[in-house]
Image (cartoon, rainbow, N blue to C red):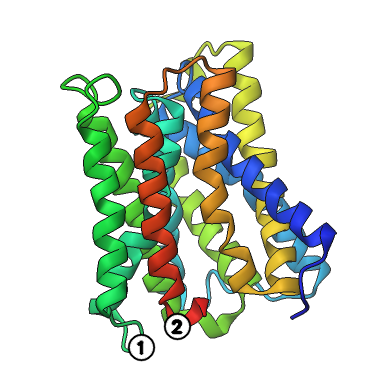
Amino acid sequence: MREANTFDIFLLVLLAIIWGSSFFNIKIATYSYDPITLALVRVIFASIPLILLCKLKNIKIEAFSKDWKFYSIIGLCNIAIPFTLIAIGTSQINSYLAAILMSTTPLSGTILAHFFTTNEKMNKLKVLGILVGFSGILFLFLDKIIINENNYIFALITILGSTFYSIGGILTIQIKNKGNENVTTSTTIWSLIFLLPMSFLLEKPWLATPSIESTISLLYLGIVATGLAWLIRFRILSVNGLVFQTQVAYLIPIFGVFFGYFLMNEVITWRVLISLGIIILGIYIVKKNNKGFK
């Protein structure tokens, strides 16, 4: 892995912008599309470049190999369920709030890793980081302008979506030797298998009459925020490594707040900004004390 140059930093910031912008596009897409269908379209567009990448690099896709159970469970927990839950949550809360709440994934991931892995145990500094991060979330829930009795359930659903990302990450450790491109492509294929019948049975997408704005946002989510973004992530991982790539976690909620305020005219209070700072500080403390992030 090489030291990051100007172009590498540009790609990292670009990835953060793309992922940060996904939340306001999810919000717009939910105006016309049901959550499972929204997740389904995202996965369809993501699977195309991933499959092409594997074909180009002569990587065998093992979705239906003897390890298919791992790929299917990870596809369910790491893609199908969180994509759907995020769409449900974002439909009723501010898009930037979804970005902030989703940034807590490293916090829940650290807790789960302590109980379900052998080499990622918590220490005093990790516990401190988790407490700091979640205190930021609690402070956010005290802001009744942003989270109140009408939408707090949807905020919790969004946090649950981020927790499923962590569960999927823990499960992925079990097959980490199978290769990043293969694992991502195989689990994406399985998420498609789960989402397709659920969308058709529960939401009947062919009856929808979506707006142009929602359709454009949905296409953006599929082609850019999922398909292109994952290809950029692959490039960063292969050239600069995991440590550099994970720095994107600090930037995503910042861009999410920026887009929510300037493009969606969402109200931002002083409590939101303080909460954002506290959560990012908590994530920083946790990551600096993870073995994989030193």
Find numbered disc 2 in the image and state the secondary structure of the residue it sits on. Answer: helix
Give residue 40's position: percent from left, percent from top: 51, 39
The answer to whether 2 appears left or right of 127 in the picture is right
Give residue 267's position: percent from left, percent from top: 42, 17
Q: Nearer the viewer, residue 117 or 16?
A: 16
Q: Are marks 2 and 1 in contact (CB under 8 Å)?
A: yes
Q: Name the kind of residue labelled 1 in the image.
A: Asn
Q: Is residue 44 above or below residue 121?
A: above
Give residue 173's position: percent from left, percent from top: 44, 78
Residue on which the image places disc 2: 291
Q: Is residue 87 above or below residue 44?
A: above
Q: Is residue 66 visible?
A: no
Q: Which residue is at 26% across, 52% downward?
A: 134
Residue on which the image places disc 1: 119
Q: Neighbour class for label 2 at 10 Å: few (<14), some, many (≥20)?
A: few
Compute the Cα span from label 2 to label 1: 8 Å
| First in residue order: circle 2 vs circle 1 | 1
Q: Nearer the viewer, residue 168 or 40?
A: 168
Q: Name the kind of residue labelled 2 in the image.
A: Lys
The answer to whether 268 appears left or right of 144 in the picture is right
Q: Which residue is at 41% across, 76% downward?
A: 289
Q: Is residue 211 visible?
A: yes
Q: Which residue is at 34% across, 55% downward?
A: 164
